Amino acid sequence: MQKNFITVLAIFIGSTCYPQQTYLKLNLQESYIKLSGTSTFGNWKSKAKSFSGYFTYVGDKDLSSPKKGSASIKIKSDSIISRNRLRDKSTHKALKSKEFPFITFTSNNGKLYKKIAENKIQLIITGILNIAGKSKKISLLVNLTKLSNNSILFKGYYKLKMTDYGVRPPSAFFGLIKVKDEILIDYRFVFST
């Protein structure tokens, strides 16, 4: 009898002292990745059509004090499209999408930056971004919101230079139209069970 009590007590203490890891998968219908920039011809916009990802964390369910976590996003590089087929072809060539079919971001490091509201915090997430076979460590300031359906929304922006990843900015019409080096990535990820 005492042995059973000790076993039950050990299981109870273990389950309350060590929070469970929560695994959430990217909900594609509610998520997006948009890219934009400028060229000698004007502004341009593209959107990733095929991507996947997950988010895990250990901590309180309300995310008020996350202890640790990880995140991964995988984008099919030839799924980045705009309304211009010639631009898309140049983009896929510049990204070396046949040789490197995916753009990836992975992170095991996030720090609470500040609590904004009861269900909203800002995190600084540090991870590795790999584009066209070249990896760089980056830090993202992410707005994280716990939604009413227990899903989690990540929203933010990130500016990068293509040449930092060995990507030569696309051009067209024998170099008459040139894309500028800096691009803006606007992302919205909804993760749910």
Image (spheres, rainbow, N blue to C red):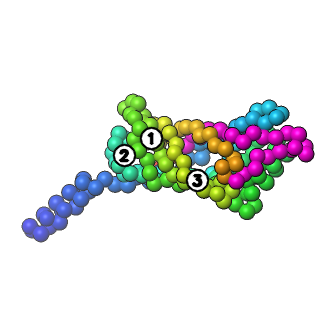
Mark 3: give few (<14), some (14-19) or many (20+) Cα within 10 Å: few
Label 1: state its secondary structure. Answer: strand
Residue 126 lies, with reference to residue 145, above or below; the image says below
Q: In x, y percent, where is residue 84?
A: 82, 41
Residue 183 lies, with reference to residue 16, above or below; the image says above
Label 2: state its secondary structure. Answer: strand
- Seen at 38% across and 51% down, the residue is 68
- Seen at 12% across and 69% down, the residue is 3
Q: Quadrant of the N terminus?
A: bottom left
Q: Which residue position holds label 1?
A: 123
Question: Do the numbered discs 2 and 1 sit on residues whose CB atoms are within 8 Å?
Answer: yes
What segment carries the magenta color? Answer: 166-189
Q: Residue furthest left?
A: 2
- Seen at 59% across and 40% down, the residue is 158
- Seen at 65% across and 38% down, the residue is 184
* Amino acid type at mark 3: Lys
Quarter of the image for residue 38 reads: top right
Q: Nearer the viewer, residue 50 or 6?
A: 50
